[in-house]
């Protein structure tokens, strides 16, 4: 493919941002294109309207392992004007109520904890973690079970809503699992047919640069020059615009996160009525962990591991042992993982979204949420004219560098607390591999639980509750002796614990099995809001 350089053309004037060119499709490209088109009149002719064009080279395979989402996806789909029933039907999608981490602490058969999507009982009013540690932990009641009802829903295979619950509404907070390939195709149809996005199947050969360093236009194989005011790089790991044309450096984070390989396989259900897990299952192995995601028609299973701690042959044996004999008839794909991100994400009139901006291991489904957050900011703060674009770019870079750093901290936390003795796990506990920002928080949390005061930005990705679920799920202990005075409201805490038990009982009695609800939605559809 031709190098992305080209002769300077006309100097970019202070013109309105009317033409947005998204380079690359997939989930990232179509979410960005759709969010911009849905928020701005996508006809290019009306006052204030824009034209969104997505150009995608034919024959580019999808990475296809981004099958877990956050609850934010509900709002993204709603803002795109997508009916939840249609999404569930067309994308093999299921409900996700959190993640179950098995064998992460000591590797034993009974070693597991949950990171649910429901906040702890009364979280905005008081911190129950202190009272749980003092009075309930010794009784064998896990932190998640004591303060949240969602773990028991997952263990019982129940859905997070009822058939009478309207689209995007919930009984228990939820996200989705989805078939990444089907989702991209679904978004493509919706964006082109309903939102007016122009779609070109063509190859970008080179870039024409303006005198001020902006991208003036793209030279394509079959469509000639493609001019634009803002270019969105969704070209995957290649990062053809931000990395290739602008040469923005890649910041390698493999010194913190050691995972650099994935083996992925699609596993059919043995029987048509097999239960569908309504949570991501992450099972620790000697050199990484295995994900297990239940869709309507299959499971997505994969082993992410560190090649410095395991050979490819040993990793495949681990995956085969997990899947069982069914894997003998299945195709296993190997996917390289480059943990890290670009130094900047928006340069001149080019912004990178998705894998072209960076990627970290898929432990907490952060890849798609960063796509959603990027698309949201681009759409909502689309620069009106070129003279304010650099201001938006600077803010975008500051916000997303902060978010990437916080995600790295949170992912590392999972490894830092493990007591497993294999070299992969012991190396992860080496202080040299732990960011200073996380080490400082761990020092604070020795004497008090994580709280909102620890996360003061309005751009946080994970709330304090998420840190509590991981910390106390993995056996971390906070020394409460120095803050015993904060345990005086014990009677209020007892009321909250009782309220959680009542909520749990009601939910267990009222909610249907996961597969049962999905089958009814496929047949009848959910009530539109």
Image (spheres, rainbow, N blue to C red):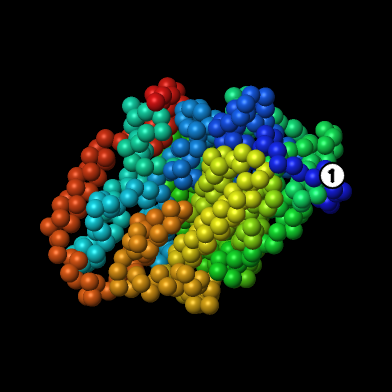
Rendered position, 44 above or below 137: above
Please tell me whether mark 1 sits on a helix, a strand or a loop.
loop
What residue is shown at x 24% (from left), y 45% (from top)? 504
* Residue holding disc 1: 9
Q: How many marks?
A: 1
Extreme residue toward the left, this view: 491
Q: Is residue 394 left or right of residue 472?
A: right
Q: Nearer the viewer, residue 88 or 496?
A: 496
Where residue 455 appears, as percent x and y from the top left, is: 40, 60
Q: Nearer the viewer, residue 294 or 180?
A: 180
What residue is shown at x 39% (from left), y 55% (from top)? 463
Where residue 291 appears, as percent x and y from the top left, is: 51, 53
Extreme residue toward the top, this view: 524
Splitting the image into 4 quarters, where does residue 194 fall?
top right
Asked if residue 332 shows in the view, the reply is: no
Where residue 523 appears, as percent x and y from the top left, is: 44, 23
What residue is shown at x 33% (from left), y 27% (from top)? 164
Q: Nearer the viewer, residue 261 or 36?
A: 36
Asked if residue 358 shows in the view, the reply is: yes
Q: Nearer the viewer, residue 346 or 130?
A: 346
Splitting the image into 4 quarters, where does residue 223 fall?
top right
Where residue 105 appears, as percent x and y from the top left, is: 40, 67
Q: Is residue 127 left or right of residue 332?
A: left
Location of the C terminus by quadrant is top left
Q: Is residue 78 left or right of residue 220?
A: left
Splitting the image into 4 quarters, where does residue 259 fall?
bottom right
Q: Residues within 10 Å of mark 1 (few under 14, many from 20)?
A: some
What residue is shown at x 23% (from left), y 62% (from top)? 132
């Amino acid at each position: 493919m031709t190098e992305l350089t080209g002769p300077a053309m006309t100097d970019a004037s202070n013109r309105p941002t009317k033409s947005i060119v998204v380079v690359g499709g997939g989930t990232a490209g179509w979410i960005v294109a759709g969010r911009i088109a849905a928020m701005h009149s996508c006809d290019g002719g009306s006052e204030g309207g824009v034209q969104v064009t997505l150009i995608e080279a034919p024959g580019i395979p999808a990475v296809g392992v981004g099958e877990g989402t956050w609850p934010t996806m509900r709002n993204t789909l709603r803002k795109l004007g997508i009916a939840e029933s249609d999404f569930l039907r067309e994308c093999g999608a299921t409900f996700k109520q959190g993640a179950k981490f098995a064998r992460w602490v000591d590797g034993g058969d009974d070693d597991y904890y949950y990171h649910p999507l429901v906040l702890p009982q009364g979280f905005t009013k008081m911190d129950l973690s202190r009272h749980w540690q003092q009075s309930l932990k010794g009784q064998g009641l896990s932190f998640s079970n004591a303060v949240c009802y969602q773990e028991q829903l997952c263990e019982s295979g129940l859905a997070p809503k009822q058939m009478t619950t309207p689209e995007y509404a919930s009984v228990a907070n939820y996200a989705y699992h989805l078939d990444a390939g089907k989702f991209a195709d679904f978004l493509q149809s919706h964006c082109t047919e309903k939102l007016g996005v122009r779609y070109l199947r063509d190859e970008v050969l080179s870039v024409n640069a303006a005198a001020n360093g902006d991208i003036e236009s793209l030279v394509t194989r079959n469509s000639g020059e493609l001019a634009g005011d803002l270019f969105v790089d969704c070209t995957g790991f290649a990062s053809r615009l931000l990395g290739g044309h602008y040469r923005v450096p890649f910041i390698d984070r493999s010194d913190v996160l050691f995972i650099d390989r994935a083996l992925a396989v699609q596993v059919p259900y043995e029987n048509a009525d097999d239960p569908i897990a309504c949570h991501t299952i992450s099972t620790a192995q000697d050199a990484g962990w295995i994900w297990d995601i239940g869709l309507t028609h299959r499971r997505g299973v994969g082993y992410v591991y560190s090649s410095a701690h395991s050979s490819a042959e040993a990793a495949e044996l681990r995956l085969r042992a997990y899947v069982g004999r069914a894997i003998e008839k299945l195709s296993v794909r190997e996917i390289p993982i480059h943990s890290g991100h670009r130094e900047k994400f928006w340069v001149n009139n080019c912004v990178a979204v998705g894998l072209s901006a960076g990627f970290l291991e898929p432990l907490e489904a952060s890849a798609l949420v960063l796509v959603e957050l990027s698309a949201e900011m681009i759409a909502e703060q689309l620069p009106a004219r070129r003279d304010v674009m650099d201001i938006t770019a600077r803010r975008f870079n500051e916000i997303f560098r902060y978010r990437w750093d916080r995600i790295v901290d949170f992912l590392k936390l999972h490894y830092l607390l493990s007591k497993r003795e294999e070299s992969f796990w012991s190396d992860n506990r080496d202080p040299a591999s732990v960011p200073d920002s996380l080490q400082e928080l761990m020092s604070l949390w020795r004497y008090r639980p994580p709280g909102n005061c620890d996360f003061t930005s309005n751009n946080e990705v994970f709330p304090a509750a998420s840190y509590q679920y991981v910390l106390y799920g993995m056996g971390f202990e906070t020394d409460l002796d120095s803050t015993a005075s904060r345990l005086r409201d014990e009677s209020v805490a007892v009321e909250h614990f009782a309220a959680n038990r009542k909520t749990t009982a009601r939910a267990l009695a009222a909610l249907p099995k996961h597969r049962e609800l999905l089958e009814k939605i496929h047949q009848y559809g959910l009530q539109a809001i």
